[in-house]
């Protein structure tokens, strides 16, 4: 398989101030002989690839609309439905756009070979034609960085690709000292890949080292030094550098992208203040709402428990991010949930605020739930096996979404994004309560929590001055406790007597994948509706 079909190239001749930016399309040669492949070059700013000197030391005129060394430019490559869309931008230059069909060739006959190619490649025997369907059905991948096109090979071997440059016998230090190298700086870059992408495993094994036995979570999400973890079997680990556990915390490759997996059963060993298992990161830094902090995550929920009681609000749910107080009642000012009922394709994303209960008795605490996509926590079944209607605007298992939690000067700013869904933003004051009187208890809480005796009020200053920390991963909300004890939190799910392997075999667990996440200080919010 040919490895490249697109190359973005910058070329500047010695003595010139400005160089050229162009892109090349390399044909996917028909037949088994790839030696006749060629590139067709498109100028963006300056010349295309075919503009060369008349002899070894004679350079063409400097391009008037070229790009100088150190001058910034950007590009976007988007492939959708087999069509490649290119956009190039640079301040002071015209924005250029191009399209190229990658699944239907325009070069299937000798008569289709462009004049540029006839002049540049045909004289050196590279005169092939392309497959009718071009690159249709072939595994492709992006590459980004610095791919030096100048080498020391004799131009007599190939007048297109063999540069005859000085290499000092391969001495890198000397090449760097005398300007015989390429250097490219990037200030930003992003990549998005279809969920339907498959892994080009052969390429990774040959080139990128992704076939090594273990890729640790900290190699995918670098912030692991700022966290410790509690896993579903009760194991704690404080040092997450080069750490994994094949049953709870590890990495997978999906398409061409690595993800960190957090997996935990319905029943295992729990923390001291919870009935639920978790494989969840625990931030080592603690901070007050006034000091602030920020947590981001891009994730997809792959599994929630298929067992539970539909009348129980916590059934079939998992928490993928939270703020937890480390003082006082140790309540949770934020929990971000995903919940999907059995038989439904789409589930709900919602977030809960738990009050910091006034007084010493925390038994009256309750959560107020806010829907992001789909329903809030209070939407439940009428009987154990009766499920409410599936949410039309919900999120499917395996569907990616992202969140940002930004606490700045006592105010929590939340942003949720998912392709194909409306971006949602919320704010919540963490240092001034709106629930200080019984009359302030919301209708949702009166219906869900008050009937089970959880009817407390909150401290006037809410979580002001209390140290807290972020948590991220998979905090399973489904457990095996009898709903008779608590119709909000006791799910009555199947646990197979705590046998984790059997729970995994029978869908009685939760699994969440993260591909990106950051943690740090709170920042002044952007405009927030």
Image (cartoon, helix red, strand yellow):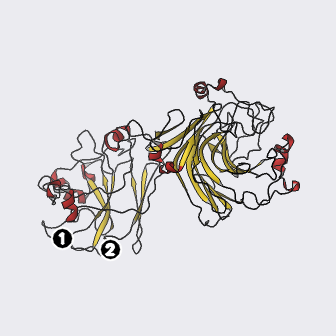
- Nearer to the camera, 20 or 306: 306
Image quarter where the C terminus lies is: bottom right
What residue is shown with label 2? 65
State the count of labels.
Answer: 2
User: x and y percent of residue 212 in the render?
Assistant: 37, 38
Label 1 close to label 2 by CB (< 8 Å): no
Above or below, comparing residue 449 to residue 86 in the picture: above
User: x and y percent of residue 277 in the render?
Assistant: 64, 36
Residue 258 falls left or right of residue 401: left
Q: CA distance from mark 1 to mark 2?
A: 17 Å
What residue is shown with label 1? 59
Q: Residue at position x 30%, y 44% from top?
A: 2
Q: Which picture quadrant has residue 318?
A: top right
Image quarter where the N terminus lies is: top left
- Taking the view exactly as shown, the residue that stands out farthest to the right is 439
Q: Is residue 71 visible?
A: yes
Q: Which picture quadrant has residue 177?
A: bottom left
Callout 1: helix, strand or loop?
loop
């Amino acid at each position: 398989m040919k490895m490249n079909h697109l190359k973005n190239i910058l070329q500047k001749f010695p003595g010139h101030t400005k160089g050229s930016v162009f892109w090349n399309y390399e044909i996917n040669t028909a037949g088994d002989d790839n030696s006749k492949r060629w590139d067709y070059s498109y100028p963006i700013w300056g010349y295309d690839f075919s503009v060369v000197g008349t002899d070894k030391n004679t350079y063409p005129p400097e391009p008037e609309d070229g790009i100088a060394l150190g001058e910034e430019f950007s590009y976007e490559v988007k492939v959708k439905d087999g069509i490649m869309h290119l956009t190039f931008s640079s301040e002071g230059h015209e924005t250029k756009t191009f399209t190229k069909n990658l699944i239907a060739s325009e070069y299937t006959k000798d008569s289709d070979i462009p004049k540029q190619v006839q002049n540049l490649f045909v004289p050196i025997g590279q005169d092939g034609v392309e497959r009718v369907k071009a690159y249709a059905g072939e595994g492709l991948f992006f590459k980004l960085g610095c791919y030096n096109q100048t080498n020391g090979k004799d131009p007599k071997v190939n007048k297109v690709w063999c540069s005859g440059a000085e290499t000092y016998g391969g001495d890198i230090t000397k090449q760097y000292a005398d300007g015989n190298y390429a250097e490219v700086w990037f200030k930003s870059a992003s990549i998005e890949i279809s969920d339907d992408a498959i892994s080009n495993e052969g390429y990774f094994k040959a080139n990128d080292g992704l076939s090594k036995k273990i890729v640790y979570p900290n190699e995918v999400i670098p912030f692991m030094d700022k966290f410790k973890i509690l896993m579903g079997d009760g194991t704690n680990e404080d040092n997450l550098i080069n750490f994994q556990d094949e049953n709870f915390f590890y990495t997978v490759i999906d398409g061409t992208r690595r993800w960190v997996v957090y997996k935990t059963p319905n029943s295992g060993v729990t923390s001291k203040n919870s009935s639920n298992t978790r494989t969840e990161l625990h931030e080592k830094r603690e901070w007050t709402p006034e000091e602030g902090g920020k947590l981001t995550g891009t994730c997809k929920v792959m599994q929630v428990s298929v067992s539970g009681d539909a009348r129980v609000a916590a059934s079939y749910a998992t928490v993928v991010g939270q703020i937890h107080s480390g003082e006082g009642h140790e309540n949770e000012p934020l929990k971000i949930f995903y919940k999907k009922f059995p038989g439904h394709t789409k589930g709900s994303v919602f977030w809960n605020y738990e009050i910091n209960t006034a007084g010493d008795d925390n038994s009256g605490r309750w959560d107020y739930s806010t829907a992001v996509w789909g329903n809030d926590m209070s939407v439940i079944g009428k009987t154990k096996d009766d499920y409410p209607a599936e949410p039309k605007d919900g999120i499917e298992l395996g569907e990616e979404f992202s969140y940002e939690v930004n606490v700045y000067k006592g105010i929590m700013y939340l942003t949720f994004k998912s392709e194909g869904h409306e971006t949602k933003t919320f704010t919540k004051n963490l240092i001034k309560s709106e629930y200080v009187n019984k009359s302030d208890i919301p209708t949702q809480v009166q219906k869900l929590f008050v009937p089970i005796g959880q009817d407390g009020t909150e401290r006037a200053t809410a979580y002001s001055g209390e140290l807290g920390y972020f948590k991220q991963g998979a905090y399973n909300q489904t457990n095996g406790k009898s709903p008779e004890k608590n119709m909000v939190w006791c799910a009555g799910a199947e646990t197979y007597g705590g046998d984790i392997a059997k729970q995994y075999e029978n869908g009685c667990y939760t699994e969440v994948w993260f591909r990106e996440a950051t943690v740090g200080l709170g920042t002044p919010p952007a405009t927030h509706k």
